[in-house]
Image (cartoon, grey):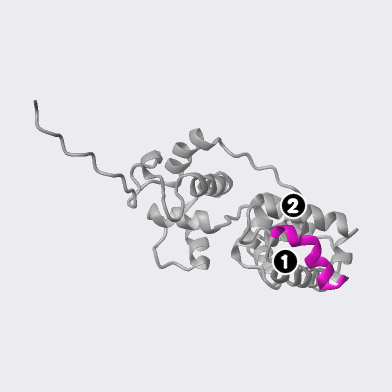
Amino acid sequence: MLTPADIIERLAPVYGMPVLQPSGDPIAELVLTILSQNTSDTNSGRAFIHLMRRFPSWQAIAEAPVEEVEAAIAPGGLARQKAPRIQAALRAIVDHAGSWNLDFLRTLPLEDARAWLRALPGVGPKTAACVLLFSLGRPALPVDTHVERVARRLGLIPQNATAERAHTLLEALVPPWDYYPFHMLLIKHGRRTCSARRPACELCPLIECPARQVPAAPAPGPVP
């Protein structure tokens, strides 16, 4: 079986080696991650920009009529579902932290920081890991649909593993210093090559993949 180091070594020349640059803003990362659910990065980014332009603060978003938040994030899709999730998470942040400052997550023991985020409404393992990794540079491995699919095909996690179990298994398998490149490279590979319906196995550099499907070469014809 390919190791995480093997996978990174094979995929980095194809997609480029990702370099982590933490944003330093946990709340923005949380909101952006909610907006990214079931949509493209382009659409979620556009919705986030509209939201920031429409409201002057997180407090204003939390207290606004939900219809106004829906209108602001409409470019991202599923606004009726995402607007109340965003507002509920923002209100819970103030209730739990007493302010909009989440700097304490930088120094809180990792599992305590993860548990604090998971206690927010609508925050699952992937969203919590995104906040920890992308905003604070802390060692957490987000497992989205692309990462999960590619990892299953490679045999890194069982086919019947739940999303929660997939996070636990992959975080134990991948070295913490490789969480970011592993996550980003598997996403790019899942989008561009190892797609859900028609994976381009013939183009894949991970030739040891147990799910690899390459059409057999035609049988040679008679020698003239």
Tell me the residue that label 2 is attached to: 46
The crowd level at tag 1 (other Cα within 10 Å; few <14, some 14-19, many 20+) is many
Instruction: For marks 2 and 1, give the CA distance.
Output: 13 Å
* Secondary structure category for the residue under label 2: helix
> Which residue is painted at 46% across and 51% down in the image?
195
Q: Main secondary structure of the magenta part?
A: helix
Q: Nearer the viewer, residue 8 or 86?
A: 86
Residue 124 against residue 154 in the figure, above or below: below
Answer whether residue 172 is visible to the viewer in this image: yes
User: In the rendering, which numbered label is found on residue 79?
Assistant: 1
Bounds of the magenta span? Answer: 63-76
| Residue 112 location (% of width, % of height) | 67, 66
Q: Quadrant of residue 152?
A: bottom left
Q: Nearer the viewer, residue 91 or 187?
A: 187
Residue furthest top in the image: 224
| Residue 125 location (% of width, % of height) | 60, 65
> Which residue is painted at 63% across and 63% down in the image?
111
Q: Quadrant of residue 221?
A: top left
Answer whether residue 107 is visible to the viewer in this image: no
Tell me the kind of residue under disc 2: Arg
* 59 is within the stretch colored magenta: no
> Which residue is painted at 36% across and 41% down in the image?
202
Q: Nearer the viewer, residue 34 or 74?
A: 74
Is residue 148 found left or right of 45 in the rendered image? left
Is residue 210 found left or right of 46 in the rendered image? left
Tell me the kind of residue under disc 1: Ala
Is residue 138 found left or right of 218 in the rendered image? right
